[in-house]
Image (cartoon, rainbow, N blue to C red):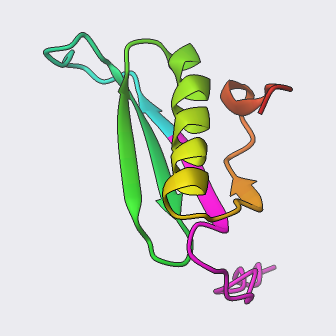
Amino acid sequence: MVQKPFPSNRDKRNYLTFELLHLDICGIMEIESLGGSRDLLLIVDEASECMKGFCLRVKSESEDYIRKYITMLQTQFSMKLKFIRHDGVRKFATRSL
């Protein structure tokens, strides 16, 4: 039996800039950066496809960077973040976010 292909666009809603963010942590990288980082937090805006990356020494730093980025969006651009998507792994499973 052949499986049907996934829909090309699960959510056809057009989001405003900085209304929906996608988060992912990449790592552990083989080569350590000059600052001692081996992981990367990547934040992507759905509407503008704007990307922001943060170098992490340990994955637990990701929560602080996410908070700072959201605060910056709210103060600098007066935007209210409504949704965050991630791959559902434990690295983002925190009650404080």
Residue at image point 70% right, 55% down: 85
Which residues lie in the magenta part? 1-24
Check residue 14 for magenta coloring.
yes
- Quadrant the C terminus occupies: top right
Quadrant of the rendered structure where residue 89 is? top right
Quadrant of the rendered structure where residue 94 is? top right
- Quadrant the N terminus occupies: bottom right
Residue at image point 32% right, 19% down: 38
Answer above or below: position of 22 versus 33: below
Give coordinates of residue 2: x percent, y percent.
75, 81
Answer above or below: position of 8 versus 41: below
Direction from residue 73 to residue 16 in the image, left or right: right
Direction from residue 55 to residue 16 in the image, left or right: right
Check residue 73 for magenta coloring.
no
Quadrant of the rendered structure where residue 30 is? top left
- Name the dominant secondary structure of the magenta segment: loop
